[in-house]
Image: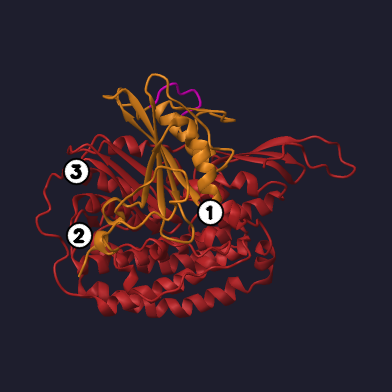
Amino acid sequence: MIVKEPISTPGAPNETFVINIGPQHPATHGVLRVKMTMDGEYIVRAEPVCGYIHRMQEKMGENRTYAQFLPNTSRIDYLSAMTYTHGFVGAVERAAKLQVPPRAEYIRVITSELNRISSHLVWWGAFLLDLGGFTPLLYAFDDREKILDLLEGITGSRLTYSYYRIGGLYNDVDDDFIKGTRAFVAQMRPRLRMYRSLVTENIIFRKRLIGIGPISKEMCRKYGATGPVIRGSGVPYDVRRVEPYSVYPEFDFIIPTFEEGDSMARYLVRMEEIAQCLRIIEQALDKLPSGPVMAEKVPRVLKLPAGDYCYAVEAARGRFAVRIVSDNKEIPYRVKLRTPSLSNLSLFEEASQGMLLPDALALMGSLDLVIPDIDR
Amino acid sequence: MESAPTAVASQVLPNPLAHLPIPFQAVDYAAKGYHLDATVNPDQVVAMAAQLDKEGLALDTITGVDWMAQGQMEVIYDYFHPAKALRVVVRTRIPRDNPEVPTIQSVFPGANWHERETHDFFGIRFLGHPNLTPFLLPEDATYHPLRKDFTS
């Protein structure tokens, strides 16, 4: 529970002061404000203040059709746009009982996993920036560029793809994409080894992370933290495995978990996840069936049967769930977007208590926040 | 080949929480996306949360739905199990002209932000909440945009 008394520093006058991190601060990666009550260099209370880029996405969902809302789903967590669109189209397909062709599902998996890698690469570079290392960002963006080029080739976009459609995909992939993706997988594996020797084994880096910002299993559960945060606390919770969706059950991959619960554990989870994404992509390319990529007879204007439908996916930051409440009209009665960054950040106040300020920034970086994902 | 919604066997599984005194309905996961669904009275939500907490469930999210035609607000509590496929929905209905429900913040501290957000969007008051101030809306906001009678 939150202790409001200042932590006394021996010999120092017992007074606290308030500083603001943000709303414009490089370590917050967007407009997040953290109101920090400090006792010297130690945090007494760190209160995140959200809503600076709130756009009321859920209200937008209530005044347009399902197909018209689809592009919004790329703009919630803009680094993991594919998985978010997957969550939304999944919910609509579940409600409309649409059969998605297998080829479309495989391509969804390939593109989602590519997107997950590109998201983790941005996190990796930005996290290292937070910790004071500039160079890794340049390597990360170099590799990410290859993914963006591949996705641009099939979707026309580099960030907000809106590639999935209700019932399938916008278009089929071409040979260039398949060849390019195979080449990327082959290139990325040695890069991961290089990342390991460049950063993961760096003693200065390790000392900044090991034992810093421990988050217990229990804290994850109480706050609903998911994704690499809960897996870094030793809980193998991954929606792809626990509540399997799409064609994920057909692939052989492991859910990396680390018991320590510190910032290093969360770092290692994401790095290991990149390797697992490569495995999934490779298997999906090998098994890629032929056929159409769009379900037949998807009505142009969709009316979902009245009721309440949920669909959850594993986004790069954790569990993303969509709830659609329909009253059998062309526009949804209610669209709820459950985003992982909000729950992951909500534990920050408790987890950061009594930490040194620079350590708290390492903890915040290890949560991998995307602010529009919180504010929506 | 089956598609995403039917990848999980389409059937209603027996209620794994049948030993709890919660009026759960088992739901077809493939059709709905959750396994158990219960509607309770507003004064029971804290007790429900405490029982689900003992079962090891985690808080997924809290949200509302404005049923203006019926003069009611619905508050929906979503839970998930961190180790197995078990998604639980607990709902309660409250009068629209006096939307009040106790906070579950004492059981799940993570409810704090979800309840603030629901208060922002619907004006639902969570009794006992320590800080029911605007969370995503501006700090001087007096409107609730997801109410069906909201006009900008």
Residue nearest the observer in this picture, B42 or B130: B42
Q: Quadrant of the N terminus of chain A?
A: top right
* Residue A87, position as x, y percentages in the image: 32, 53
Q: Residue furthest right?
A: A11
* SS under mark 1: loop
Q: CA distance from mark 2 to mark 1?
A: 36 Å
In the picture of the structure, the residue carrying the numbered disc 3 is A305
Residue A160 vertical placement versus A258 (above, below): above
- Residue A50 shows in this picture: no
> Which residue type carries mark 3?
Pro
Residue at point 25%, 61% (across, down): B6
In the picture of the structure, the residue carrying the numbered disc 1 is B56
Residue A21 vertical placement versus A361 (above, below): above
> Which residue type carries mark 2?
Gly
Q: CA distance from mark 1 to mark 3?
A: 33 Å
Residue A19 lies within the magenta run: no
> Which residue type carries mark 1?
Gly
Left or right of B133: which side holds B67? Answer: left
Which chain shows up in orange?
Answer: B
Which chain shows up in red?
Answer: A
* Residue A86, position as x, y percentages in the image: 30, 56
- Provide the chain ID for the residue under circle 3: A
Left or right of A153: which side holds A256? Answer: right
Residue at mark 2 shares a chain with residue at mark 1 = no
In the picture of the structure, the residue carrying the numbered disc 2 is A168
